[in-house]
Image: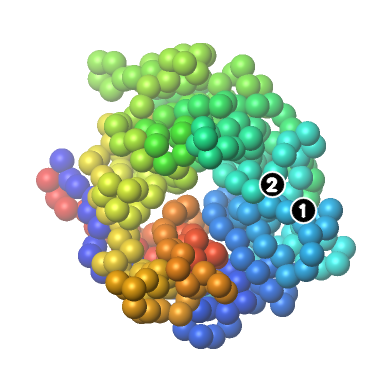
């Protein structure tokens, strides 16, 4: 069978997407978020289409001013863009409070402090649906995922239901036409596929599905329990029955998108073994999934000592000055790899994907570009 492989050297940083100044290039970022929106630093950046705009969900965000009710400690941020092309950067417009600075999303009854963030979103029937995670603790490395709905394009939210405390903590959703994927629990209309991971950076991936007409009903979720003869998927109403799509218990944040050029589902996730951002592909949402390949390595692809800080130690003298103030001894790292489907390019032989990646130190989000190629079987 044909294989999808990474084109070595093709993973490149386009720009620092958030923050005021690109530390590596020593020039203003395209969005100058401190001056325009009072935003010093943030992470994550899952994206999805809604009402003709591309929305980004950012995680724990630091403001230029003291915390307020509009920007509580550990609050998050949501932005959108109309840009059709990303090669010169993406112009972001943040949802703002009356003072013109970014407005942190709030879900009544849900704590959204440090490490309690929006991890995925989708648009359906005119509403914006965002999955938030809360109750995170370092001891359990997990918490609770919840489904929230916004009818005003991300300014306000209401809590619909709790999703799970395991297997589906971080979630990457995708809206599909059911008829295009025989084997889903519903044969017509739209549905939402939900790929999930549980204990943070210690989980295999799982898959769930909910019909579009029932997306506001937690009891309507169905969980993938394995594939039978002819790769026919089996489903259960019980979360406990969900089985891993493959074994690689390193996953935290993940991104799953349909690559229309290669005709493959593409999954990205950061990995500790092998080090870097891993990718896998599959013909069907449930697999079988390919062996993992490395899409980005922080050493090989000019991350460390370029736009990701390598900690200063006696054994490792300074090789960059991109660190946040006072964090010379703090390692940066690569995480939160999310494909931006709007910008995917290619043909049947290769595809260029655009994606975001957080770097921890500096604490901001980078816009990346990589190329995948099909090798005939």
- The residue depicted at 38 percent of the width and 18 percent of the height is 225
Residue 118 at x, y percent in the picture: 62, 45
The N terminus lies in which quarter of the figure?
top left
Give how far across and how far down residue 376 sits, in percent.
Answer: 14, 50
Q: Residue at x 68, y 52 (%)?
A: 74
Tell me if residue 222 can be seen: yes
SS for callout 2: loop
**Farthest residue, direction left:** 377
Residue 42 location, quadrant: bottom right
Residue depicted at 52% across the width and 78% down the height: 22
Residue position for label 2:
113
Q: Secondary structure at mark 1?
A: loop
Query: Is residue 373 positioned above or below 309 on the image?
Result: above
- C-beta proximity under 8 Å, tags 1 and 2: yes
Name the side, left or right, on which 267 lies relative to 38: left
Mark carried by residue 72: 1
Residue 229's image quarter?
top left
- The quarter of the picture where the C terminus appears is top left
Q: CA distance from mark 1 to mark 2?
A: 8 Å
Report x, y in % for residue 219: 61, 17
């Amino acid at each position: 069978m044909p294989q999808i492989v990474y084109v070595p050297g093709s993973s490149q940083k386009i720009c620092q997407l958030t923050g005021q100044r690109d530390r590596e290039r020593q020039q203003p970022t395209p969005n100058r978020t401190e001056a325009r929106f009072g935003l010093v630093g943030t992470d994550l950046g899952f994206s999805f289409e809604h009402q003709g705009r591309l929305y980004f969900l950012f995680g724990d965000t630091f403001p230029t001013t003291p915390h307020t009710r509009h920007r509580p400690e550990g609050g998050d941020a949501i932005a959108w863009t109309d840009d059709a092309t990303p090669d010169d950067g993406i112009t972001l417009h943040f949802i703002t409070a009356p003072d013109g600075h970014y407005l942190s999303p709030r879900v009544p009854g849900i704590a959204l402090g440090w490490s309690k963030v929006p991890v995925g979103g989708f648009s359906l029937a005119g509403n914006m649906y965002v999955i938030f995670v809360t109750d995170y603790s370092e001891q359990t490395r997990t918490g609770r995922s919840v489904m929230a709905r916004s009818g005003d394009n991300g300014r306000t939210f209401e809590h619909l239901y709790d999703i799970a405390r395991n297997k589906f903590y971080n979630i990457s959703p995708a809206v599909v036409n059911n008829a295009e994927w025989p084997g889903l629990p519903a044969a017509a209309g739209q549905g939402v596929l939900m790929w999930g991971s549980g204990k943070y950076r210690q989980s295999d991936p799982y898959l769930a599905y909910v019909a579009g007409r029932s997306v506001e009903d937690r009891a309507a979720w169905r969980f993938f329990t394995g594939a039978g003869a002819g790769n026919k998927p089996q489903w259960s109403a019980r979360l406990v029955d969900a089985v891993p799509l493959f074994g690689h218990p390193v996953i935290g944040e993940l991104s799953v998108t349909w690559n229309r050029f290669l005709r493959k589902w593409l999954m990205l996730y950061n990995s500790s073994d092998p080090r870097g951002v891993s990718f896998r592909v599959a013909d069907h949402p449930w697999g079988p999934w390919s062996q993992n390949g490395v899409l980005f390595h922080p050493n090989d692809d000019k991350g460390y000592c370029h736009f990701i800080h390598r900690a200063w130690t006696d054994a490792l003298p300074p090789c960059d000055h991109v660190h946040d103030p006072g964090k010379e001894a703090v390692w940066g790292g690569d995480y939160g790899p999310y494909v931006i489907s709007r910008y995917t390019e290619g043909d049947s032989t290769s595809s260029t994907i655009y994606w975001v990646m957080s770097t921890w130190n500096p604490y901001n989000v980078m816009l990346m570009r990589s190329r995948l190629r099909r090798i005939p079987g």
